[in-house]
Image: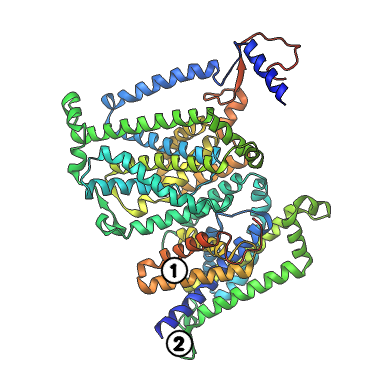
Amino acid sequence: MTTGLETMTSDSQADQDWRIETGTRLSRAFSFVCLVAFAALAVAPLLLSRGVVQDLFFILTMLTLAQSWNLLAGYAGLISVGQQLFVGCGAYALFGLVILAGLDPIFAIPLAGVSAMLIAVPTAFFAFRLYGPYFAIGTWVIAEVGRLLLAQWKALGGGTGTSLPRDATRDMLGISLLEDWFGMRAAAAADALSFWLALIVAAITIALVYKLLRSRQGLGLAAVRDNETAARALGVDARRLKTMIYLLTAFITGIIGALIYLQKARISPDAAFSLTDWTAYVIFITVIGGIGTIEGPILGVLVFFFLQNAFSAYGSWYLLALGALAVVTMLFAPRGLWGLISDRTGFELFPVRRLLRGGLVVPNEKGGPNG
Amino acid sequence: MNWLDTLLQGVLLGGLYALFAAGLSLVFGIMRLVNLAHGDLIVLAAFLILLLVSSLGLDPFIAALIAAPLMFAIGWLLQYHLLNRTLGKDVLPPLLVTFGLSIVIQNGLLEAFTADSRRISVGSLETASLQLGSINAGLMPLLTFGSAVVVIVALNQLIYRTALGRAFRATSDDVVTAGLMGIRPNSIFAIATGLAMMIVTIAALYLGMRANFDPTAGPARLIYAFEAVIIGGLGSLWGTLAGGIILGLAQTIGAAVNPEWQILAGHLAFLIVLLLRPRGLFPRAVD
């Protein structure tokens, strides 16, 4: 064993040029596209109408929810059907902090994320006791408990809910600045501000997920997903990794919940803890786009937005078709639309596979890059 | 005698929850599949019975007798052609497919029957009651509880005394070896789901006769069924009945304190059991 290790070290010292990397030419080109897209989206509120900005806000928030659910279910194997708990808790934390404590919404948003994460600690304690499929329903039960408990909170309207006072959003930090600089009206400025926050959160989430997957923890996560027993035998602390990811996604989901309800300005327990809006749609987006890839939710949210606009007037027929589409995808293309595309083209926009690059290639030498 | 009355109501309500749960428990026990559409299938069966009652003017019990084989066929087809494809080492596909199915059934029912809440009418039976010493027990809750006991006895007999039950247990233990012994797991699974759907029909009959239901009532039934299974412990049908009773007791006691706390009290009882006995009160299965 020891000699083997020594040989390996001396080999790598001899070939200084060898390096492990995950990027490809395509992914580097795509990261440039991402920067351009980010810049274009950042100036959108200055150029586009309020309706378009609100649509983009919706896309970005759903994208972030889908990315964090994808991290949870697609990478950590934690299939939660109770993410509405964190949307609701984040939203209620925002309303509580703004209405009862008089805090500026901008400061309340990160605190809402923290409250959702705090709620996730006891939730994880209970839900992690349940195996696989039962974990799913367990998270759902806890989300129901959250909804029923908040319906008892009379200061925030109980079961019927409450509205954010108009002044709270009008006097938000930065609104007057936007009014002065760009001549926006208060309502448009509030929309622009929430849009920018959503854009930043979405960008950070995608970057964070990508960074996580390329890190040691990401490797551990993939190992746990492929074979938990073997991974644990090699020293991967599966439980700790899963808990960490569960808390992280709760934080992100809580922030998005706060943002969504800051923009809606009206909350009720049934809406904030809606299974359909905050979990079913999110699952459909991820599954149709491609679960277990970063590209999947991005593609999925665009498809979802198109379907929503084209067919949502059909009410329950629309939901029925969406559910059926998710079932068909899961059965016949389990890796979703992005899986179909990358199988045909070999494209990976966010590659996480580790490749050994550089140095001299000596094809016949044993113990080479793949030996 | 008010408290005694509440306790009796709670125990009898547990019978209904055990009926919700028995099918879920059976399917999980045999193929490790958690059907997230279970609650919606109960509501689907309730609408089927309602349709038979209102269009043919049948007695609800006769209607359930006709609905049961239909539901068996639905369950068989569902399992054979859809859910069997999702079974495997990965728990993700069956969960996501049944979740999608749940949304499909709910919205299909909404289109077919609108969002109005309905009830299966049984005339005087609804209000009939029995004098038990100093307290009154509704005939309908008693009948529900009795049916739950009969269903569990019958299922236990089937599982432990018949050739089919032996095949169930064999596939549950080891699919590959069972296959070598001439059992076809796919058709065993389909029969199991069909059977579960017959129990679902019985559950739906009592659900529809005792309370109002509407197309969106499914998820809550799934949650009650799930809680009863977990409280009772996996793999034991009598445990599931006990779990249902505990859930029913918690809900009726909660409701007696404050009507708004009924559902919450049930969930809290579930969480307390999960805290103290993570494997349930009477576990038998290892997973």
Q: Residues within 10 Å of mark 1 (few under 14, many from 20)?
A: few
- Quadrant including the N terminus of chain A: top right
Does residue A269 appear in the picture of this structure?
yes
Tag on residue B135? 2
Where in the figure is residue A86, as x and y percent of width and height? 40, 47
Report the residue at 78% width, 50% height from top.
B176
| Disc 2: host chain | B
The residue under label 1 is B212
Near-viewer residue (B223 or A328) = B223
Left or right, B251 with respect to A326, comes to: left
Q: Secondary structure at mark 2?
A: strand
Near-viewer residue (B69 or A279) = A279
Count of marks overlaid on the render = 2
Where in the figure is residue A150, as x and y percent of width and height? 34, 56
Q: Amino acid at mark 2?
A: Ile
Q: Amino acid at mark 1?
A: Asn
Are dots 2 and 1 on a single chain? yes
Report the residue at 63% width, 41% height from top.
A228
- Quadrant including the C terminus of chain A: top right
